[in-house]
Amino acid sequence: MRLTGKEKFAYGLGAVGKDMVYMLSASYVLYYYQDILGVNAVAMGVILLIARIFDAFNDPIMGVVVAKTKTRWGKFRPWLLIGTITNAVILYLLFAAPPQLTGSGLVVYAAVFYILWGVTYTMMDIPYWSMVPAFTESGRERENLSALARSCAGVGSALISIVAIIAVQALGTMMEGADASAVAIERTGFKWLGLIVAVLFIVLTLVTCICIKEKSSVDMETASVKDMFRSLIHNDQAMTMVIAIVLVNTAVYITNNLVIYFFKYDIANLSWQSDYTLFTTFGGGMQILAMMAFFPLLRKAWSTMKIFYISIASAVAGYIMLLVMALSGTRNIYVLFIPAFFIMSAVGILNVIVTIFLANTVDYGEWKNKRRDESVIFSMQTFVVKLASGIAALVASICLSIFSIGGASTDEVVTEVVRASDSSVFGLRMTMTIIPVIVLLIALVVFRKKYCLNDEKLNEITAELANRKNNQSV
């Protein structure tokens, strides 16, 4: 039986809340602790990367736990709800650092709660994506639901990109007063924004859990973490997509981490918050439009593999344009929309495509290894996306440290903007454009050489799996 519109809508709402939380953490934790609270940039980068390395052990374990879970509500929904509630609480605490903490105490606080955030995010992210193969048929229905979920995730990410800084300023000013220092306003603003996002996250996940039921779930032999890693390694297509997802997301997150510094310290005008919000609003809008409109249109004419190549080329072109404009001293926000269009449209489409490709590797693994490990494979998606954010944060923090950007916290009221030195802004521009281009080109080479699951191969695999099931039932 095919999914109803209500079920699709409910599943999509879960993605909205999930990626609101993820975007707030991925894009603003470094800024919150380094630029607002004054924590050393490199220390923060190391914390973010260590947390992701920890996930290398935590995520596969969670995949095994999900695979072994059997309850009257299914094996996915209980963990989806538990993970959401705990992650929402940790998110709030992450952006509500006690004012009395300074120095090493603040570093320890950031490390503990960021690691806990990653653990609890895994608890709900793995079952969320693992549900896709469990209650859809392979082929178009799965592809369409994956595209819908990714589109809704893009909506959640875009909402945070659009409202975060403006909301922080508004909430902070309302709570602290217009005469408060910039640090006090931003610190309080992030605390209240974290609380609002946490509550929305719980509400939207509840809708998903109430409306979605696991229509079918493949029984699979549970295994140790060692067995699961071995199974993943034997699935060469899953490994290829894991590498590609790490590279693509690393490129994107480097820019996401640094673009706020670009507006604050490079463009550097009194309305930088408004310009930054306008820029991210446009970029988020293009990402959503790409997921919901551009990808379906392109899919009518080309295969997903060809669309992947087009998207990489679009992102690279956008980054090059952004670098040229930055080096030429462009300050017009509307001119900067041009590279944003090419980059963010490509990001939106790539988010949909890599999820489809990863879902396809579940069938490939069953066909090749006679084992269906959807929880494990999708647990690797959770890990690699978070690993990418950790690598990107480390790269960004090294850039901020080397070029002495940000981190100059003050309790005084700021009445004028501070522009970084010419050498600092040059380093910032190069880091947020050239490094992503190099990383995307590496992803292109890896994908082109290793990934083989085109439409013809997938049809062959689907037919073979159907024949096996028929033979077993006879």
Image (cartoon, rainbow, N blue to C red):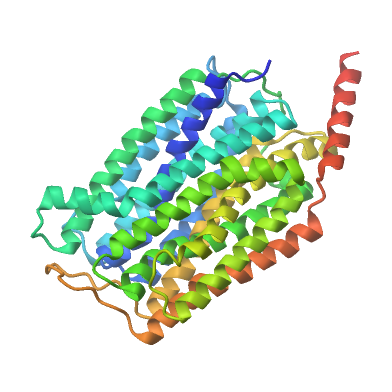
* Quarter of image, res 436: bottom right
Q: Residue at x 39, y 70 (%)?
A: 332
202 left or right, relative to 317: left
* Residue 373 in view (yes/no): yes
Above or below 382: residue 218: above
Location of residue 13 with respect to 106 vertically, above or below: above
**Residue name at image x 71 percent, y 24 percent:** 218
Residue 442 percent location from the top left of the image: 68, 67
- Residue 447 left/right relative to 385: right
Rendering coords of residue 52 (x, y %):
50, 55
**Residue in the foreground of this view, choosing between 94 and 116:** 94
Counting the numbered discs, the total is 0
Residue 96 in sight in this render: no
Q: Position of residue 53 (x, y in %)?
A: 53, 57
Instruction: Please provide percent x and percent y for residue 415.
Output: 15, 71
Quadrant in the rendering for residue 68: top right
Q: In which quarter of the view is residue 358 placed?
A: top right
- Which residue: 82% across, 50% down? 452
Which quarter of the figure is the C terminus placed in? top right
Quarter of the image containing the N terminus? top right
**Relative vertical location of residue 87 with respect to residue 390 in this rendering, above or below:** above
